[in-house]
Amino acid sequence: MQTKNELDIKMDNYSQAAMLLLSMGEEGAARVMSYLDKSDVQLLSHKMARLSSITQQEAEAVLSRFFERYKEQSGIARASRSYLQKTLDIALGDRVAKSLIDSIYGDEIKILVKRLEWVEPQLLAREIAFEHCQLQAVLLGLLPADSAAQILKMLPQASQDDVLVRIAQLGDLDRHVVEELRLLVERCMLMAMEKSHTQVAGVKQVADILNRFEGDREQLMEMIKLYDNKLAEDVTDNMFDFIILGRQKQETLQTLMGMVPAETLAIALKGIDSELKASLLKALPKRMSSAIETQIEALGGVPLSRAQGARKDIMTLAKQMMQDGDIELQLFEEQVVV
């Protein structure tokens, strides 16, 4: 008979982490998740929402494994930050101690800036557009590269080179710069919170309505184009969601998948619903399907923005092939021919 430590835990690492967070209660889980990256928070949130049918034996095994690993890595040899802060304050003085502590633990402002990963890049770009280039550089230098690149692209083109050079030259931050950055982050978060309470997914709603409308949809779309051509494009884009591929005929998927580069497909399939993944892989020859699965495993963790970008590329191709008459796509349970 297997012991708890020897039990083969069938849950993946994220599911185990989700179970641990749920067992900690709201406050404890929130404190842990505040230190995680955006993609990890999203994955864990999905796992926590869908976690079910955990046996007592599995729960005990996961908890036992966690505490075994904790005991292996949590010896008495490490002093807490507060202990070091007090000790170094007495020995070196406040300013020198603060500099040394920051070099050991990393600047506290990084944790604050991490919250901005959840704010729309467009909103951040608008909010910092009139700030000094140095403050823009500090903020972008502390954000993940994907987010920073998106925001930089939306800043005035004339200042982009200057901001990049300043990022490359960043070093230790003065206290007044940190304070300015803190105020900027708080302002951006406040703006994002106000926006989130009033934002309505209107474009997506229009796309759903059009797909279910039994009258002349083309005429309605032409009316939207007359009002706002960009809005019409956004509505059309929202009608081509990656999830609809799971409802397509096998011959449609075979034609489409045959035109998608292997690397793009592997990235797009990272983290998607298992049924949709199986449906798409089924459309490939067995050898190619096996190769794609191997490539997916080899990729390891992929930024969510990169996976979403790959899915968007595939749907752009699908849309073009449909317009060219190469395939027919069924959108929201309706047959659509362009």
Image: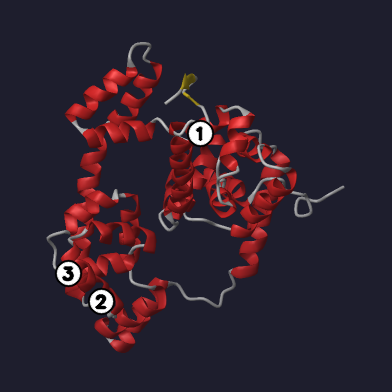
Relative side of 280 to 98, left or right: right
**Disc 2 target residue:** 165
- Observer-side mark, 3 or 1, equals 1
Please provide percent x and percent y for residue 62: 66, 50
Observer-nearest of 256 and 269? 256
Q: Using a 10 Å C-alpha cutoff, classify the residue at mark 1 as few (fewer than 14 neighbours), some (14 to 19) or many (20 or more).
A: some
Residues at marks 3 and 1 touching, judged by CB atoms closer than 8 Å: no
**Disc 1 target residue:** 243
* Label 2 SS: helix
Q: Which of marks 3 and 2 is nearer the N terminus?
A: 3
Tell me the CA gap for discs 2 and 1.
41 Å
Looking at numbered disc 3 in the image, what kind of residue is underneath it? Cys
Observer-nearest of 116 and 233? 233
* Label 1 SS: helix
Query: Is 145 located above or below residue 317 in the figure?
Result: below
Please provide percent x and percent y for residue 289: 69, 46
Tell me the CA gap for discs 3 and 1.
41 Å
> Quick check: can you spot residue 179?
no
Observer-nearest of 41 and 96? 41
> Quick check: can you spot residue 335?
yes
Observer-nearest of 195 and 60? 195
**Disc 3 target residue:** 133
Residue lying farthest right?
1
Q: Earlier in the sequence, mark 3 or mark 1?
A: 3
Residue lying farthest bottom?
92
Looking at numbered disc 1 in the image, what kind of residue is underneath it? Ile
Please provide percent x and percent y for residue 312: 44, 44
Tell me the CA gap for discs 3 and 2.
10 Å
Q: Using a 10 Å C-alpha cutoff, classify the residue at mark 3 as few (fewer than 14 neighbours), some (14 to 19) or many (20 or more).
A: some
Q: Quadrant of residue 75?
A: bottom right
Query: Is 320 located above or below residue 306 in the figure?
Result: above
